[in-house]
Image (cartoon, rainbow, N blue to C red):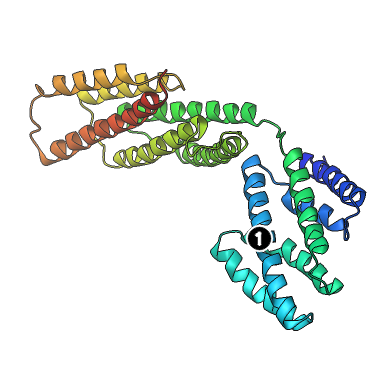
Amino acid sequence: MNLIGYRTLKTAIGVVIAMYLANLLSLEYYTAAGVIVILSIQNTRKLSYNFAFQRIIACLISLFLAVIVFFFLGYSPITFGIVILLFIPISVKLKVAEGIVVNSVLVSHLLIEESISSSLLFNEIGLMLIGVLVALFLNLYMPSNEKVLKENIEFVDLKIKEILVDMSKSLKEHAVSVKEEENFRILEERLKLAENLAYTNMSNNFVFTKENYYVTYIETRNQQFIILKRIREHFERLFMTYSVTHVISDYTLEISNAINERNNADYLLEKLNNLRTSFKVLNLPTTREEFENRAMLFQYLNDLEMFLNIKKSFHQKYKN
């Protein structure tokens, strides 16, 4: 078992560097710079930059409040409490709450020293800047998860293909696969894992955008998964076999063979429209049961169209 992870090692190195730099600059309470590094090392670059910004802004707010309160009311546990009483809601309101804890410690230094001199204020600002900058520097490098992410995407695609193959068989045989429940459960779990990996990958990019290829791809598969769950419900009411059933079954199998990252679904959508045209010449159902069953088959076809259009929209978004 790997007891020391990459983030732990990076944090330990950062603590040493920050404390050394703060001591080298003759800053009081130099160990606080190391504590700030511990709080600032994050799993992604985006989080690191966000928290660093929050802590610096909160630092300025806390020191400003401390100067005002200590100047007029003096130094005591009560006045320190007043500073905190003002600081916390302001930080929450300005969405810099990540800076509350560490900056409360910095304000306590003013209380201990019973001073709001400019040198002490710059001391606290220096501790904050050293801590967050060391953390940001160490977080410039993040190990890539792209290989694992791609492996999960491939697994998701294969599992969707397997589910469609089973659906194709079920249309002809009226027998649901014994692995159906397990396949849907595994697919849902892998989609969640792939989604987490995709968002982590996006947060580690230098250009932070709301949209990302991998994130959008997983969202596409999530939408298709919802369609598959709806299609699954049709089989509870499909109990008759027609020639059209075999045609739709073969078409479902064709879709399964085209499940991959590059397929844009254009050909399959064109074929689906051709199938609809050919079905218009079929004889009308003669019984209520036939009518309901035929209606479910066509609803199944409509769901497949939605399934394909979701993938087409993805390719239109990312086409070269």
Q: Which is more toward the observer, 17 or 158?
A: 17
The part of the image, by quadrant, that contains residue 115 is bottom right
Give how far across and how far down residue 128 sits, in percent.
Answer: 76, 54
- Alpha-carbon neighbours of circle 1 within 10 Å: few (<14), some, or many (≥20)? many
Q: Is residue 169 in sight in this rendering?
A: no
At a point 73% along the width and 47% down the height, the residue shown is 41
In the displayed orientation, state which residue is furthest to the front: 118
Give how far across and how far down residue 269 sits, in percent.
Answer: 27, 22
Q: Which is more toward the observer, 7 or 2?
A: 7
Name above or below for residue 129 compared with residue 315. below
Q: Is residue 83 left or right of residue 17?
A: left
The local secondary structure at tag 1 comes to helix
At a point 72% along the width and 39% down the height, the residue shown is 139
Q: Is residue 145 left or right of residue 78?
A: left
The part of the image, by quadrant, that contains residue 277 is top left
Name above or below for residue 120 compared with residue 11. below
Give how far across and how far down residue 280 sits, in percent.
Answer: 11, 24
At a point 55% along the width and 37% down the height, the residue shown is 208
Q: How many marks?
A: 1
Q: Residue flagged by tag 1: what amino acid is it? A: Ala
Residue that badge 1 annotates: 58
Q: Is residue 222 left or right of residue 201?
A: left
Q: Which is more toward the observer, 3 or 121?
A: 121
Name above or below for residue 201 compared with residue 106. above
Q: Quadrant of the C terminus?
A: top left
The part of the image, by quadrant, that contains residue 114 is bottom right
Give how far across and how far down residue 166 sits, in percent.
Answer: 41, 29
Q: Quadrant of the N terminus?
A: top right
